[in-house]
Image (spheres, rainbow, N blue to C red):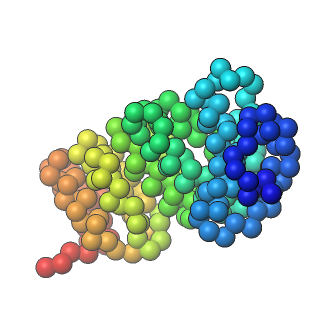
Amino acid sequence: MLIASSQLSFAATRAFKGALFQAVCETGARTEHGAAFAASKFLHPLLSWRISPSTGKAPLSLVEVRRLLTKVPQSVLIGAAQCFKQYIQQIGNSPAQAWRHFAGPMFEAVWPYEARFKRAAVSRELAALCATTGAAFDEAFSVLRHFLTPIDGGWYGVTLLDDAGVVSANPKTCLDFLWLVSGPGASGQSMELAAVLDKIVEVAPNLEVDRRLQWLEQNRVIRLH
């Protein structure tokens, strides 16, 4: 019932956190929405308190949430990554501000660093999070790169880079990012990737001879002639 109900108040979250944590660890959420909703039950109160700390004692501690994320099913870890992506789109005046002042510091404090949590399915969502951080892309990538792995089957979010305007502002970092998620060890090909690589070369012509860009062009790009 705690998972299915609406968001709890700070006081209720503190009072029922034991039962809430157990419910999250045992959730059978099968859909992306269900997993993200389950993750929001412990992330939302913490983020809300960080935005308005004058409301009193924190409903949960960073240590408690970090420990919880090491115990939840993979679906909830994926849902947690999706929650962070939603937060940077909804909080503050821009995704960059939201990342720098709220979502980014909280992510660094609670996300598990152990190698066993570095999973391809989770990486896909963290890559999408990174791609939507706007002017904070460089900073976000410096944090998130440690959790990213090559993505199988192509990456649906490659166009997010251009949509967020980060290719023009950060061509070198974009290439670093693409090499990590779409380079050796990944699979699939994409027409969208061709447009992003073209943009990188347009903004930073010196990168056209970068062997990583050439490899991506030869192995991951589909071009219609």
Residue 97, given in percent of the width and then of the height, sits at 42, 32
Q: Is residue 50 left or right of residue 172?
A: right
Q: Is residue 68 above or below residue 49?
A: below
In this view, which residue lies farthest toward the front?
6
Whole-percent x and y of residue 59?
A: 75, 33
- Between 118 and 196, which is closer to the camera in this rendering? 196
Viewed as shown, does residue 112 lie left or right of 12? Answer: left
- Residue 100 appears in view: yes
Q: Residue at x 29, y 65 (%)?
A: 193
Q: Is residue 172 visible?
A: no
The quarter of the image holding the N terminus is bottom right
- Farthest residue to the bottom: give it: 225
The image shows residue 176, relative to residue 106, as above or below, that is below
Could you tell me how many numbered marks the image carries?
A: 0
Quadrant position of the C terminus in the picture: bottom left
Residue visible at 74% across and 67% down?
A: 28
- For the point 80% across and 49% down, which residue is it? 20
The foreground one among 2 and 103 is 2
Q: Position of residue 149 (x, y in %)?
A: 51, 59
Q: Residue at x 41, y 43 (%)?
A: 133
- Among the 4 quarters of the image, the one containing residue 5: bottom right
Q: Quadrant of residue 57?
A: top right
User: Please, which residue is most extreme toward the top here?
Assistant: 54
- In depth, the one of 191 and 41 nearer the eye is 41
Q: Is residue 108 left or right of residue 21?
A: left
Is 204 located above or below residue 97 in the figure? below
Q: Which percent across, then down, holds residue 51?
A: 58, 29
